[in-house]
Amino acid sequence: MIQMLMSIIDRLIQLKKYRSERLKLIFSTILEPIFNDLSVIHIDYIEMFTNVEKATPFLWESRLADYEDKIKSSIKYLEDKRIEFEPVRSKIRIMADELKDLEINPEADNFIKSIIRYFPDGNPVIESDSDCVISEINEYKSASVNYWKI
């Protein structure tokens, strides 16, 4: 009886070690690289929006000769920068799609769900005020084009 109990305890210890090693492997080979890629993308977003904020003229400057050129330049900059990390965003989303049903552990599962919400199709979701800059610039673009046609 004691031998059987010791065997069961030994088996549970082995199972716990297996799960721990599996989680370490998943973290080091999958989750950590995804996190590192997300960190690079996030830093790029901050830099990108800071640069656009500095380069984009205020609406009150709309009567200045170079207003439309500045708006177009900001739009072009955003379009170019968006392409720069598009493959990384798509890769992250594909990996998250593959991982979403694995039930690794609650923290990892929440991390994966967050990625899917952030990049539903490999592209960023516009949810916060800072993300609305693109929408606002497109509105300015339309307004500028219409203004200059008058």
Image: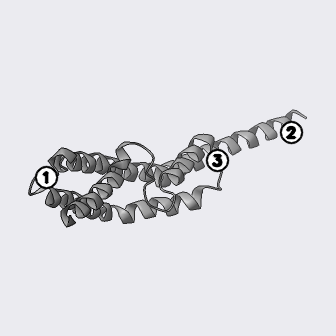
Query: Residue flagged by tag 1: what amino acid is it?
Result: Arg
The Cα atoms of the two marked residues, 2 and 1, are separated by 87 Å
Residue drawn at (43%, 48%) of the image: 35
Q: Nearer the viewer, residue 23 or 146?
A: 146
Query: Marks 3 and 1: which is nearer the front?
Result: 1
Residue 29 seen anywhere in this rendered image of the structure:
yes
Q: Do the residues labelled 2 and 3 touch (CB within 8 Å)?
A: no
Q: Which residue corresponds to the image point at 43% horizontal and 55% vertical from the top-left?
A: 124
Say the numbered circle drawn on residue 18.
3
The mark that comes first in sequence, 2 or 1, is: 2
Give the quadrant of residue 144: bottom left
Mark 2 or mark 3: which comes first in sequence?
A: 2
Please say if 6 is above or below 79: above
Disc 3 residue crowd, few under 14, some 14–19, many 20+, Cα 10 Å: few
Indicate the position of residue 118 as horizontal and vertical percent values.
Answer: 48, 51
Please name the residue that numbered disc 2 is placed on: 4
Residue mark closest to the camera, 2 vs 1: 1
Q: Position of residue 78 (x, y in %)?
A: 27, 59
Q: What residue type is labelled 3?
A: Tyr
Name the N-terminal-most of marks 3 and 1: 3
